Amino acid sequence: MSGWIASLAMLLSFLVSLSIFFSFLLHSPQDRILSIFLFDWIPFGSLKINVGFMIDPVSSIMTLIVTGVGFMIHLYSIAYMREDISIVRYFVYLNLFSFSMLLLVLADNFLLMFVGWEAVGLCSYLLIGFWYEKPSAIEAGKKAFIVNRVGDFCFLIALFQILTIFGTFDFSDISRSASELFMKDSFNVNLLCLFLFFGAAGKSAQFPLHVWLPDAMEGPSPVSALIHAATMVTAGIYLLVRNHVLFSLAPSTLMFIALVGSFTLLFAASIALVQNDIKKVLAYSTLSQLGYMFLACGIGAYATAMFHLMTHAFFKALLFLGAGSVIHAMNGEQDIRKMGGIRSYIPKTSFTFIIGSLAISGIFPLAGFFSKDAILFSAFKSHSLAILFWFAGLFGVLMTSYYTFRLVLKVFYGDKNFKENETHVHESPPIMIFPLFVLAFFSIVGGWVSIPMISGGDVFGKFLSSVLNPTVSVDSHHNLTLELVLMFLSLGIALLGIFLAYQTCCKKRQFFSDSSVVGMRLFSLLENKYYIDEIYSLILVRPLRFIANLFFKLFEQNIIDASVNGTGRLVKSLGANLRSLQDGYVKTYAVSILFGAVCIIFLLVFNFSSRF
Amino acid sequence: MFPIVSWMVFSPLIGAFLILFFGDKNEKQCKRIVLIAIISSLISFLFSLVIFMNFQSSPKMQFVENLKWIESLGVSYRVGLDGISFPLILLTTFLTPIVLLFSWDDIKKRIRLYYFSMLLLETAMLGVFVSLDFFLFYVFWEAMLIPMYFIIGIWGGKKRIYSAMKFFLYTMTGSVLMLIAILWLYFATGFGTFNILVFLNSPVDPLLQTWLFAAFAIAFAIKVPMFPFHTWLPDAHVEAPTAGSVILAGVLLKMGTYGFIRLAIPLFPEAAVEFSPLLIFLSLVGIIYGALMAMVQKDAKKLVAYSSISHLGFVMFGLFSFNLLALGGSVLQMVNHGICSGLLFLTVGMLYRRRHTRFMDDFGGIAKVMPAFSVFFVIAVFSSIGLPGLNGFVGEFAILSGSFQSHFFPTLIATIGVVLSAVYMLPMVQKVIFGKIKFEANRVLSDLNLREWFVLVPMIFLVFLLGIYPKPILKIIEPSTKSLLLKIKGRKLLVKKRNIKKLRLVISEIAPRRGY
């Protein structure tokens, strides 16, 4: 029941965003903006912060993704969470999340966006730790929140800078006056954008703040699909795109963003190569795909980043839901080494999962092909260092298709690595299958809204052009032959990845011999995720705890408090000693009086003489 | 004019004396006492609401009452309120009925004396906030100390005598310094009056300010408490009964910060500006140090106590950055901290009354048996962490964004405190309400009873109200902080000019001797 109410609410929200979207299509580009003011939130002195919403083509796309994909995931959850006793709590959190995400996307100023930003973090915390009796789930939730807080620290500093410089948080005001207030590539604008980017990197799990996302897989699979693939983690991209005017004034920062993005995409993809948990593979894949989006932002191709954000939402949600369906079928098993050959048991799930895999690998004509290719093409022709980014992206394509198909082949094909009579592998109910098919459909056609080869085919880019500076989107005078060559190249690389996966998984051919020392080292390095968690624990977590303990035991208790107590004791013992003065013997008093009198006389005489 | 401020201040006292006429031998009599106590504090709350309705957004003192008292000394009964004191008054009148209701399940011995003390305490606290006469101020200030001493010493935990003594002696040290400073001020200026407004309007000679400011500052810093005068706080908070801890953290700590903003800063602006680097440094140390201490506590109540040190550090930081936004944020944050730390102490107290332990490791899996409680608990924790949309955020953000404009690096350090708050708070949630139930005793815990609902719901309501719609209270705070700041800013220029003069003087003195 609770699930249906929640889904209905999402459906309603989706219909509203759909109607806004269509009304935008009917209007001319410059009219594609709606804003409403609700109330004063923090009016103090010269500061006026409103609660108000603004929707333009960029946020319209985001709301469609949040509500559309969200609605599918809600439907899916009804069946997926059916047997959980806390299903009501689950849907409360899920809808709170959707609300917060919409708040984030629709906010017309930075601070309100920050409210949504933090609220999605809270929901993420609650949903990762949804099964709170599992210590690892709670630990993962806590880690996610704290790592995000580190990003938020930077976000907050950026907000302070914005307030100091602009005196307002309003997005449109800031975009309008940014070029007047900042010199291009000046120190200030770079500093501001850098802090904003670190904030974005926390939420979107870019290196080195990526550590929380793989652990976040402790949450239920639909949550991973909604929050940790399709929507929340893309908030960082949205932040960058929303403030592209600021960022384009800071080319050095953009270069840095592109570097971090391409590093993350390679770094995460390489970890994904050897993971054995079905959801962990997908998690690292998400990191890697987010890296692509940051790379796109970094080279100024904001529309392309949004495009990839959208197609990624379709196919990654599909993959996560598919993985959930697999886990459901396998009675909770997540280790791909204990699966294999289940294609015939769950044909619908495997069909849609393979579509998702083809889409993410970038196979023509699925969605991922177009969006990834658009990023690669923009990288190729952007600037001097771009060939490096292009190469990174291309290498990423190879790894992506390899790890995805390694997953597909190990799960759905090959030998059965489980006891058939113990695990009754079963197909999921229709209400779980339906969203899979819808998402699979969009994973195929989602990319067709932006086919650059056909003149005027970039419908998506045009829709966003009223917000995103048209000069940064793909210009029309590009070299068609070059683009076709690049396309075939990336398609070929993707197919090569699939072929390699086939060779290793089905033919058992080994490219790295596990026995060689280098191979072993490399393998264990990847399997242990480059030991990043261990490094953080060694240089951050444990020293902090050690210092805190040291201060408490040594400084707080033995120095400050001891000196306070010592003062008390001193006064007490002083009193005890002074008490002996008042011993009640007349002779003692007489001597004291005499002594006092002598002193007074002495003083008087001294004073008297000194006056003359 | 109806003396509404006095009625608000003294209606708890009337209740307190009424209570003395009733016995507390059986349950029926006890109930009657509690009822009288709650009603009299509610009446005070109602008066404060009436004031709220009629409060004008202006920097002036409002609802001023003036009666002659000891004319020969220039002492008068002068009370009134403005945008700085009124938010704290509202907080006090709001919190007191709640903690009185909460005490019903907690306090089982010497009930009459307990409620008498609590009501006396309320009157004293309100008195401090409304006093516009140093003499009166000091009377209320000291009057606060006695009931609190008894509340900790009689109804407290195991180490209650030690803690009560420590609390008393610490605060007394500060009070004595303050008394000396007040008398010094009285005699040095020669106005022949204790009227605070007179002192506020006529600046003290900058040469006198340093020592006077230092005396006031130490008195208030102990109350806040600022590092390194803070060690009374964890002991007092932990040993006090829950209601006492709520009042301690919620209102009594604000006496320190209120003292700074009402007296120490405006009376001695030059000295305040001069001392501000030191005070900012100490508040930053407090933010980080309090957070680190909170991180290693095993006792939930102690954790919350140390978190107060960290939070009050933000308030002090805001006060001494001398920026409008930060100053307003500080006043707001005083209220917010009162609510969220109060809420945390209440929830921890609810756990304590069920299990008679506060060690976090004794709990675990509470979400399963006390779902409603857990919701409130999590909201309290996130309010303390400063989640936007809840009350803690608005003040914290205002403080930090305001002070950022003049103090770049200090703000960076203070903002680390925002990260650390999650680091020390979330493990508490993790240990207490999440996880599996480890102890059989926890399996049978009952969820909130009706009284506890009545205690928590108004608090939570305020958590959301102040987070989402703080406009009404900001409108109260704004004019007073603005005029205060203008005053300081004006004086700051004077300082500079005077320094130049002083420098010239020095030069002209030295120069002839050197034979120029």
Image (tube, coloured by chain):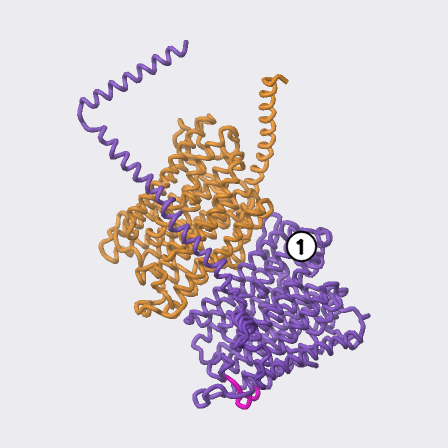
Chain colours: A purple, B orange
Residue for point 17% across, 25% down: A585
Q: Residues within 10 Å of mark 1 (few under 14, many from 20)?
A: many
Q: Position of residue A76 (x, y in %)?
A: 54, 80
User: On screen, B158 above or below A12?
Assistant: above
Residue for badge 1: A190
Q: Position of residue B79 (x, y in %)?
A: 44, 39
Q: Position of residue A247 (x, y in %)?
A: 69, 59
Which quarter of the image is occupied by the C terminus of chain B? top right
Kind of residue sitting beneath label 1: Asn
Q: Residue A522's image quarter?
A: bottom right
Q: Nearer the viewer, residue A88 or B83?
A: A88
Q: Nearer the viewer, residue B343 or A141?
A: A141
Report helix, strand or loop for mark 1. helix
Q: From which residue to which does the magenta span run?
A: A339-348
Left or right, residue B333 beside residue A363: left
Q: Is residue B175 something that shows in the picture?
A: yes
Q: Is residue B69 magenta?
A: no
Q: Nearer the viewer, residue B293 or B387?
A: B293
Magenta stretch, main secondary structure, is loop
**Numbered disc 1: what chain?**
A
Residue for point 32% across, 15% down: A602
Q: Nearer the viewer, residue B23 or A350?
A: A350
User: On screen, A556 above or below A440?
Assistant: above
Left or right, residue A368 beside residue B351: right
